[in-house]
Amino acid sequence: MRIWGTRRGNVILESTMMIPVILLLLVGMGQIAKITYTYYSLRKAIYSVGSYLGSLQGTNFCDPGDPNLQQAIAFGLTGSTDNSLPVFITGLTPDMITVSAQVVDPVTGAIGPCDCSVTGCDISAGGHPPNYILVSIPNGYMITPRIPFLPLEAIPLKPQVKVPYGGT
């Protein structure tokens, strides 16, 4: 009587059961890597906007049409201030990026938004410059992971960076 003769199909059966699970795990890891890379790229782009704005002088953060703001956003998206190059991240548009001025409260030391008034950060009305610049994508950059046989919803990536303002 042969004992080993009855076990010949076990390896094939176990392999065919495990291969789909392993492939699903590999595809899932690839999608997690794609989402992580996209988030890093978004954060890098908005950090470029903040660092560019942090060194400019005469920027009016209360006017969304300020040329410095538009140039900084174009620089973060394309690498040029005049939008002459293609966008680094497909689907990211200038209207998705929000720039706001932040100020340190002298009493509490808390960092909060700076109001657009003469006593706030409205430079055109005689206000003072902000302490920080907050650049964010408040509505999120939507990315949908693609894993076979699993319907997944889009994930909003909402990076934000706060950089010190050195301009006047």
Image: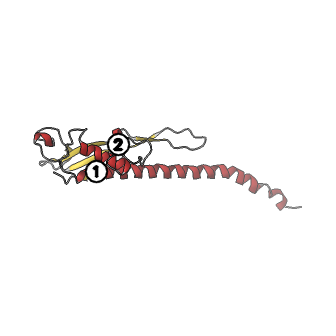
Residue marked by disc 2: 137
What numbered label is drawn on residue 70? none
User: Is residue 38 toward the left or the right of residue 106 in the image?
Assistant: right
Between circles 2 and 1, the one closer to the viewer is 1
- Whether residues under marks 2 and 1 lie with C-beta atoms below 8 angstroms apart, the answer is no
> To which quarter of the image does residue 60 belong?
top left
Q: Mark 1 points at which residue?
A: 50
Identify which residue, 85 or 131, lies in the foreground.
Answer: 85
Q: Which residue is drawn at 20% across and 39% down?
A: 62
Could you tell me residue 111's position as x and y percent?
20, 47
Dot 2 amino acid type:
Ile
163 left or right, relative to 16: left
The residue shown at (27%, 52%) is 52
- Badge 1 amino acid: Gly
The residues tagged by marks 2 and 1 sit, at their Cα atoms, a distance apart of 12 Å
SS of the residue under disc 2: loop
Residue 92 percent coordinates (x, y): 40, 42
Q: Indicate the position of residue 167 as horizontal and vertical percent values.
A: 18, 52
Residue furthest to the right: 1
Q: How many labels does the image show?
A: 2
Q: Quadrant of the N terminus?
A: bottom right
Q: Tag 2: Cα neighbours inside 10 Å, few (<14), some, or many (≥20)? A: many
Residue at image point 31% right, 48% down: 81
- Where does residue 39 sit, x and y in percent of width and height? 41, 49
**SS at badge 1:** helix
Classed neighbour count for the residue bearing mark 1: other residues with Cα under 10 Å, few (<14), some (14–19), many (≥20):
many
Instruction: Give the camera-side residue of 150 and 42.
Output: 42
Is residue 166 in view?
yes
